[in-house]
Image (cartoon, rainbow, N blue to C red):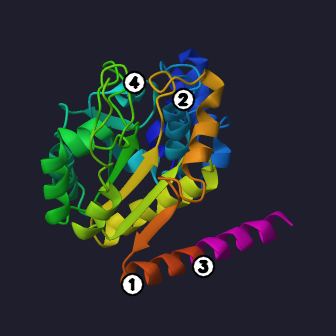
């Protein structure tokens, strides 16, 4: 966990693009306490994207990238969808898989990295939409959990197929009418968080991205737990404002409504007893580091 991987050769320093020089100078690589507050000040965090203006997924991407415990030793596995438009803009290793097989790819990748780097921690993080996770890719998602593969799965839940016209997905809410689901969905939203828990995930969180501190905490918990125990899952509500008929500035309000009392995205978190004890120890270690840093500055 250091900046060693992005050092500039002294002989080439004067001809390197200023963007790369800024990356080396300002990167938060090596800081295990990095978080969402670093958004906007760290060059390896997403500076730009090709998503729609006001897209909640772009907000989610920023918080996720900012909260990675070790971005230089992390590999994302993505799938076809709006998320695949963002990965070319980030300075974190990533693989674009076929639609739905991202957890199968991640399984093989994590095992290969463990063989190639036996003495180094390499985090694999799956990030895909609801279509790739619960519809087309559900089989491979579940099988990775059944096998207890040690990586984190993140679902950006749009509650529909956002980049192909607004078809219904298994995570669409019952009765919702979209452009390509004119009669409305006929069955309830699939309870994916509960399925993850029952399928062997050691840590599960379901939330929106309206509160960055929650996203940061959930992501760090999920990755740290995956390293030690096994599969973890995070479900983030990232509504497609275009497909649900909202304006670009209304995404935040939509998420806040969804997480209000009685809403379908009221914050939920599950962890096994062993994981709870583990996370408590990690919290205490983080508090000690912050106290030490504060004392050093004083």
Residue 43 location (% of width, % of height) = 59, 32
Q: For residue 297: magenta?
A: yes
Above or below, 180 against 33 in this view is above
Report which residue position mark 2 lands on: 10
The residue carrying pointer 2 sits among few (fewer than 14), some (14 to 19) or many (20 or more) residues within 10 Å by Cα, namely few
Mark 1 or mark 4: name the one nearer the start of the chain: 4
Mark 4 or mark 3: name the one nearer the start of the chain: 4
Mark 4 and mark 2 residues within 8 Å of each other at the beta carbon: no
Residue 96 location (% of width, % of height) = 26, 31
Mark 1 → mark 2, Cα distance in angstroms = 50 Å
Q: Which numbered marker is on residue 292?
A: none
Residues drawn in magenta: 285-298
Above or below, 246 against 35 in this view is above
Q: Which numbered marker is on residue 284?
A: 3
Q: Is residue 236 visible?
A: yes
Between 119 and 85, the residue placed more toward the observer is 85
Q: Which numbered marker is on residue 273?
A: 1
Report which residue position mark 4 lands on: 88
Mark 1 → mark 4, Cα distance in angstroms = 39 Å
| Residue 41 position by quadrant | top right
């Amino acid at each position: 966990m250091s900046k060693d991987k992005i050092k500039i050769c002294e002989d080439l320093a004067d001809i390197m693009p200023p963007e790369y020089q800024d990356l080396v100078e300002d990167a938060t690589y090596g800081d295990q306490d990095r978080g969402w507050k670093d958004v906007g000040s760290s060059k390896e965090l997403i500076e730009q994207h090709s998503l729609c203006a006001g897209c909640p997924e772009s907000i989610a991407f920023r918080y996720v990238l900012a909260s990675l415990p070790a971005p230089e030793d992390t590999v994302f596995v993505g799938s076809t969808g709006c998320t695949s438009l963002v990965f070319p803009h980030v300075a974190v290793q990533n693989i674009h898989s076929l639609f739905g097989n991202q957890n199968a790819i991640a399984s093989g990748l994590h095992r290969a990295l463990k063989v190639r780097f036996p003495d180094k921690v390499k985090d694999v993080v799956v990030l895909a939409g609801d279509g790739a996770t619960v519809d087309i890719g559900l089989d491979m998602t579940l099988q990775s959990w059944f096998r207890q593969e040690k990586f984190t799965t993140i679902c950006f839940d749009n509650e529909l197929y956002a980049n192909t016209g607004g078809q219904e997905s298994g995570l669409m809410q019952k009765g919702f009418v979209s452009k390509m689901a004119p009669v409305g969905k006929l069955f309830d939203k699939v309870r994916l968080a509960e399925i993850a828990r029952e399928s062997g995930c050691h840590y599960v969180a379901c939330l929106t991205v309206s509160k960055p501190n929650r996203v940061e905490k959930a992501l760090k918990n999920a990755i740290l737990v995956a390293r030690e125990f096994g599969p973890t899952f995070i479900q983030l509500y990232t509504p497609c404002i275009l497909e649900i008929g909202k304006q670009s500035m209304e995404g935040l309000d939509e998420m806040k409504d969804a997480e209000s009392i009685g809403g379908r995205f009221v914050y939920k978190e599950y962890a096994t007893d062993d994981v709870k004890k583990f996370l408590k120890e990690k919290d205490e270690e983080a508090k000690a580091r912050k106290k030490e840093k504060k004392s050093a500055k004083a």
